[in-house]
Image (cartoon, rainbow, N blue to C red):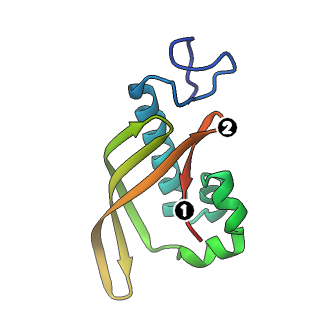
Amino acid sequence: MAVMGCATSTPSGALTENSPPEVKKEVVAARANSRWDALIKGDLDEAYGYLSPASRATMPLAVYRTHHKVGMYRAVKIDSVDCEAEVCTVNLHLTFNYKRATGIDMPLVEKWLITEGKAWLVERG
């Protein structure tokens, strides 16, 4: 999704901490959904691309792969996105299977950082 217009972005079309809150919320929600869609499909390489540059620097792809089991995730629902300056908090519900239990619903909170013109998930290794 492209963010257009001088009120919502820089001349290059990049998302910034000064973008309107509704634009930040929309972009972050879309990126969070896209990342979870990749995880649900089992595409860990694509999902890894949503990590912040700092997260990728401290967590190589091989380590990231050990944190996520392909086929485990079933669905995600974004409940809310709240942004302050360059940090956004995403509250969501994840449905997943674990061993013999299926359809487990768990609330999660993610932190997304707006930097380098995009929103990136902050994940610790």
Q: Residues within 10 Å of mark 2 (few under 14, many from 20)?
A: few
Residue at the outermost bottom position: 100
Q: In this view, does 11 lie to the left or right of 33?
A: right
- 1 and 2 marks in contact (CB < 8 Å): no
Rendering coords of residue 40 (x, y %): 48, 62
Task: Using the image, determine if residue 4 lies above or below residue 110.
Answer: above
Q: What residue type is labelled 2?
A: Glu
**Residue drawn at the location 60% of the way across and 79% of the way down:** 66
Q: In this view, does 49 lie to the left or right of 15?
A: right
Q: Is residue 4 left or right of residue 72?
A: right
> Residue under circle 1?
123
Looking at the rendered structure, the secondary structure element under dot 1 is loop
**Residue drawn at the location 37% of the way across and 76% of the way down:** 97
User: Which image quadrant for residue 45?
Assistant: bottom right
Rendering coords of residue 9 (x, y %): 57, 20
User: Which image quadrant for residue 47?
Assistant: bottom right
Q: Relative to the observer, which residue lies in front, 113 or 25? A: 113
Decide which of tag 1 and tag 2 comes sooner along the chain. 2
- Identify the mark at residue 116; answer none if there is no mark: 2
Rendering coords of residue 52 (x, y %): 62, 52
Q: Which amino acid does label 1 sit on?
A: Glu
Cα–Cα span, label 1 and label 2:
17 Å
Q: Quarter of the image containing the N terminus? A: top right
Looking at the rendered structure, the secondary structure element under dot 2 is loop
**Residue drawn at the location 49% of the way across and 54% of the way down:** 37
Task: Using the image, determine if residue 90 lies above or below residue 72.
Answer: above
Residue at the outermost top position: 6
**Residue drawn at the location 69% of the way across and 20% of the way down:** 12
Task: Using the image, determine if residue 122 lies above or below residue 72.
Answer: above
